[in-house]
């Protein structure tokens, strides 16, 4: 199950979302429910934890008469509505960015073996020009910082997804509030 946040102009909230053009709706990439809940952990919205607010809005007891986003989605609930929720949502966006920065982890340079594509990552602080034999195919891998494929955080992929979701949601919340549009949320299958 995935969670979908989206935002539409206030006067369009009761209009079926499929009838809206792309410019009339702002929506971050839908994410798995577990990732969204973990991303919201530690953030607060008004006087409650953001994760608890999300859970209560998506509970079966909190059904709304608003039209579903599409055939695979449940009815949306209003997560935040301007102008009263503007300061709380912006504070929450700042908290999400802060949590992502805090959990980001150490940065590393990344290389791949030319023979078998085995990935090698070395913390930036320890990176220097050196050649090593690949642990899989024994071909020489040149760990020259100038030839690195890129730089990334040394964290597991699930934590990386949580931090990406935090940043996406923070950007989305700021955009929705800058436009003065309410933020809606719904469960989606698919």
Image (cartoon, grey):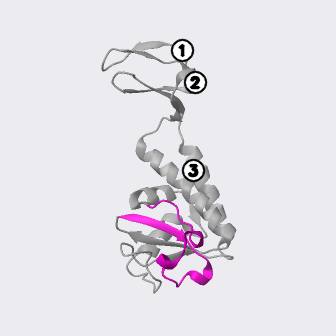
User: Mark 1 to mark 3: distance in Å?
Assistant: 34 Å
Give the crowd class for mark 1: few <14, some 14-19, many >=20 residues within 10 Å.
few
Q: Residue at x 48, y 59 (%)?
A: 29
Judge whether residue 167 can be spotted in this image.
yes
Q: Quadrant of the N terminus?
A: bottom left
Q: Earlier in the sequence, mark 1 or mark 3?
A: 3
Magenta segment includes 127: no
Judge whether residue 41 can be spotted in this image.
no
Give the crowd class for mark 3: few <14, some 14-19, many >=20 residues within 10 Å.
many
Q: Disc 2 or disc 3, which is closer to the eye?
A: 2
Q: Residue at x 58, y 55 (%)?
A: 96
Q: Which residue is mark 2?
A: 125
Quarter occupied by residue 81? bottom right
Give the magenta range.
1-30
Q: Disc 1 or disc 3, which is closer to the eye?
A: 1
Q: Say whether residue 86 is left or right of residue 184.
A: right
At numbered mark 1, what does the secondary structure look like: helix, strand or loop?
A: loop
Q: Earlier in the sequence, mark 2 or mark 3?
A: 3
60 and 140: which is toward the camera: 140
What is the number of the mark on residue 129?
A: 1
At numbered mark 2, what does the secondary structure look like: helix, strand or loop?
A: helix
């Amino acid at each position: 199950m995935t969670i979908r946040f989206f935002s539409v102009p206030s006067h369009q909230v009761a209009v079926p979302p499929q009838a809206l053009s792309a410019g009339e709706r702002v929506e971050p990439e839908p994410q798995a429910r577990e990732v969204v809940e973990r991303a919201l952990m530690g953030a607060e919205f008004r006087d409650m934890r953001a994760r608890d607010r999300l859970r209560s809005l998506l509970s079966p007891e909190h059904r709304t008469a608003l039209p579903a986003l599409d055939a695979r989605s449940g009815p949306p609930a209003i997560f935040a509505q301007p102008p009263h929720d503007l300061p709380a949502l912006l504070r929450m966006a700042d908290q999400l960015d802060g949590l992502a920065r805090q959990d980001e982890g150490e940065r590393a340079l990344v290389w791949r073996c030319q023979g078998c594509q085995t990935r090698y990552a070395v913390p930036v602080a320890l990176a220097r020009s050196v050649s090593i034999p690949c642990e899989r195919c024994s071909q020489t891998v040149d760990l020259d910082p100038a030839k690195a494929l890129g730089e990334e955080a040394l964290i597991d992929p699930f934590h990386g997804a949580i931090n990406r979701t935090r940043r996406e949601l923070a950007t989305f919340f700021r955009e929705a509030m800058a436009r003065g549009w309410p933020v809606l949320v719904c469960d989606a299958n698919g």
